[in-house]
């Protein structure tokens, strides 16, 4: 298992609590980072996972980079305003306020309460570039989760499943991801 991004302590803890052997599995998790010089490397690794079928999970900033990578297939300068304020197009733009705390998320007909901590949201005007190949779920106008169709597991969440996961009650995102990484 490869985890990229330096906001990874809680992700590693959540994975360890679910399966102490997680490091031996083949998968990629992208988290947030304090180091802007890591961003292009993250995008390259995400692209490799998408193209090779390697299980991938993008969390918050990793979710952003997952969708930026997809947009770059048609728009090489696409980026998130969090990294490049003058990007054309901006796949993610700054929201009017920070979204922090537990909020409802709807996915595949189910509602869950998920932990949020982000200031950037998907620019919905770009939805057309995703709708054919991706399953997208918006809640209150915010893209919360996206999953690439036809890939064994290539998914990202705007929210933080690691904050809602425990040994006694592992988060479904991690359980599904680990199950596919083991194969």
Image: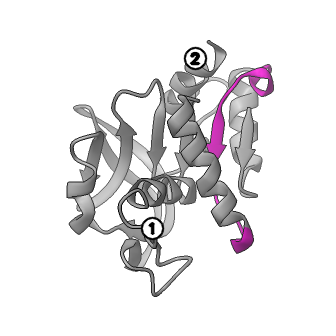
Q: Is residue 138 left or right of residue 161?
A: left
Q: Position of residue 152 (x, y in %)?
A: 46, 23
133 or 177, which is in the foreground?
133
Q: Residues within 10 Å of mark 1 (few under 14, many from 20)?
A: few
Q: Quadrant of residue 78?
A: bottom left
Residue 40, compared with residue 154, is above or below; it is below
- The segment highlighted magenta reads 20-37
Q: Is residue 111 left or right of residue 93?
A: left
> Pointer 2: what residue?
179
Q: Is residue 79 left or right of residue 141?
A: right
> Pointer 1: what residue?
76
Q: Position of residue 114 (x, y in %)?
A: 44, 47
Which quadrant of the figure contains the C terminus? top right
Mark 1 or 2: in front is: 1
Residue 68, compared with residue 50, is above or below; it is below
Among all residues in the image, which is located at the extreme top? 183
Picture residue at 69% right of the left edge, 35% below the top: 14
Picture residue at 32% right of the left edge, 56% below the top: 143
């Amino acid at each position: 298992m490869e985890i990229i991004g330096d906001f990874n302590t809680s992700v590693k803890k959540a994975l360890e609590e679910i399966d102490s052997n997680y490091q031996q599995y083949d998968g990629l998790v992208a988290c947030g980072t304090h180091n802007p010089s890591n961003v292009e490397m993250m995008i390259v690794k995400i692209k490799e996972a998408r193209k090779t079928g390697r299980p991938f999970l993008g969390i918050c900033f990793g979710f952003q980079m997952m969708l930026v990578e997809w947009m770059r297939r048609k728009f090489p300068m696409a980026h998130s305003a969090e990294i490049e304020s003058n990007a054309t197009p901006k796949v993610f733009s700054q929201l009017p306020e920070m979204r922090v705390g537990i909020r409802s998320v709807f996915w595949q007909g189910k509602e869950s309460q998920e932990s949020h901590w982000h200031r950037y949201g998907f620019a919905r005007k770009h939805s057309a570039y995703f709708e054919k190949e991706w399953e997208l779920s918006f809640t209150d106008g915010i893209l919360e989760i996206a999953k690439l169709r036809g890939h064994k597991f290539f998914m990202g969440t705007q929210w933080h499943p690691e904050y809602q996961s425990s040994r006694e009650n592992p988060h479904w995102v991690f359980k599904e991801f680990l199950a596919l990484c083991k194969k």
